[in-house]
Amino acid sequence: MNFLTVLIFFSAISFLFYGIAYFVSTNMKNEFKRFGLEKFGTLTAVLELTGAFGLFIGFQNHTVLALASSGLTLLMLLGVGVRIKMKDSLLVSLPAFFYFLLNAYILYKTLE
């Protein structure tokens, strides 16, 4: 198993858990309320789950991997933007930035 495979697997598992967490955790829903983006919570969770499954499928299909990683990169870029707009601390904003960089790297390596 190479390094890129480990990163893809890590990202896919993470987004699988984040997507599911929205539906089972009130904390996730409360965060979207705090952001003033309550109407986008379900959509975001579905996009996270779709991205996670796309990353898993991407082990066999590089086109799907590129689409999934680009979608998750964009989603996390928007997440970083929301965190900046809300003036959240660097520590609170770091996970969104980390997953932005992680999926951007996966996309870069996929297109290489």
Image (tube, helix red, strand yellow):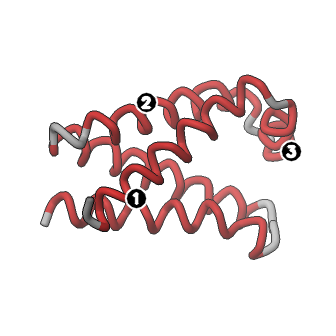
Q: Is residue 25 left or right of residue 78?
A: right
Question: Do the CB atoms of the residues marked 2 and 3 lie less than 8 Å apart?
Answer: no
Label 3: few (<14), some or many (≥20) within 10 Å? few
What's the mark number on residue 65? none
Is 23 left, or right, of 29 in this rendering? left
Residue 39: x and y, percent? 71, 26
Under circle 2, the secondary element is helix
Marks 3, 1: nearer the viewer: 1
Residue name at image x 34 percent, y 50 percent: 69
Nearer-N-terminus badge (2/1): 2
- The residue identified by callout 2 is 50
- Label 3, label 1: how far apart the Cα atoms are: 26 Å
Residue identifier under label 1: 103
Name the residue rendered at 77%, 66% in the picture.
Answer: 92
- Residue drawn where x is 34% and y is 67% of the image: 105
Amino acid tagged 1: Asn
At label 3, the amino acid type is Arg
Residue 106: image quadrant is bottom left
Q: Is residue 4 left or right of residue 74?
A: left
Name the residue furthest front.
Answer: 1
| Corner quadrant of residue 46 | top right
* Label 3 sits on residue: 34
Picture mark count: 3
Image x and y of residue 49, in percent: 50, 31
Which residue is pictured at 37% across the width and 59% down the height?
6
The quadrant in which the C terminus is found is: bottom left
Which quarter shows the N terminus?
Answer: bottom left
Q: Earlier in the sequence, mark 3 or mark 1?
A: 3
Q: Secondary structure at mark 1?
A: helix
